[in-house]
Image (cartoon, rainbow, N blue to C red):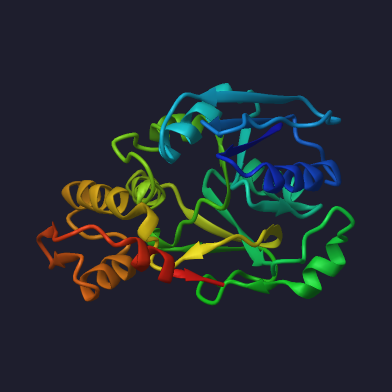
Amino acid sequence: MSTSVLTIVRNRAGHLAQLVEGLRRSDTAPRELIVVDMGSTVPVSVEETPFPCRIERLDCEGLPLAAARNAAARAAKGDTLLFLDVDCIPMRGLIAAMKDVLDSEDGLVCAQVRYLGQDDARSDWGEADLLARSSGHPERRFPASGLRRVENAGLFWSLVFGIRRERYAGLGGFDEAFTGYGAEDTDFGFRAKAAHVPLLFMGGPGAFHQHHDVFEPPLRHFNDILRNARTFHDKWGTWPMEGWLSAFAQSGLVEWDDRSLIKLRDPTRKEIADALVD
């Protein structure tokens, strides 16, 4: 089976260039790279690659993550889809490892991500050096090799995942009722589980996560998160993003309980700035 690599981007041309560099170094080339540009201030471009590359542009505001991933999938021609967030650099063996799993497993497959510091990924980086400098996620544990089935659908993450194209279509892609940022990936994991599609954590090759500013909680997306949290609760009867909602409540931004989420006020510019963490 052939593999299409899909990524979505808004104003992160530097990160995209490193993702493409990782694909150039891959032991197995993708059938194609599909890039969906979510209204970047300066439209992104990709230098010549040894594999086909197609850029789709969405005329949009904000971060329509669900719609952008679906647009990428519609444009893809590969039998399997490998989604990479634009801040991820794929390891050399990722495409081959994901293809091998999806050849035999009709599942939703997450690969491990290792996190880099601010100055770790440069044009002269080597994979061994990045492995030595990077660290794993503190909560999402992956096997050293092979696969582990994960029953908690809430642990699905969209940073690096693979799925058969026909299965993605059968699930209906990401639900575009989720607009902007937040919960669209958790919903996708829940719908996969409801359709009896196993969530699998894959050991071995994954990706490196490039450093960028992080807001904790992500107050820049405050209203998106509230809207999408309510959409998720209406659909599943439980709340997603509980850590963020709890932080909003503790800051007096919302009233939140098992049944309702009420906005009290927007965060101030200072509160948003203070949420920036390294």
Number of dots carrying numbers: 0
Residue 229: give x, y in percent of width and height: 25, 53
User: Toward the viewer: 165 or 251?
Assistant: 251
Residue 13 vs 230, above or below: the answer is: above
Residue 88: give x, y in percent of width and height: 66, 53
User: Toward the viewer: 72 or 219?
Assistant: 219
User: Toward the viewer: 277 or 101?
Assistant: 277
Residue 248: give x, y in percent of width and height: 26, 68
Q: Quadrant of residue 47?
A: top right
Q: Residue at x 56, y 36 (%)?
A: 164
Name the outermost residue toward the left.
259
The quarter in which the C terminus is drawn is bottom right
Left or right, residue 55 beside residue 20: left
Left or right, residue 176 beside residue 73: left
Q: Residue at x 65, y 67 (%)?
A: 115
Q: Residue at x 67, y 74 (%)?
A: 135
Residue 228: give x, y in percent of width and height: 27, 48
Left or right, residue 97 beside residue 272: right
User: Toward the viewer: 69 or 191?
Assistant: 69
Q: Residue at x 58, y 39 (%)?
A: 9
Residue 1 visible in rendering? no
Residue 8 visible in rendering? yes
Q: Quadrant of residue 263?
A: bottom left
The quarter in which the N terminus is drawn is top right
Left or right, residue 57 beside residue 27: left
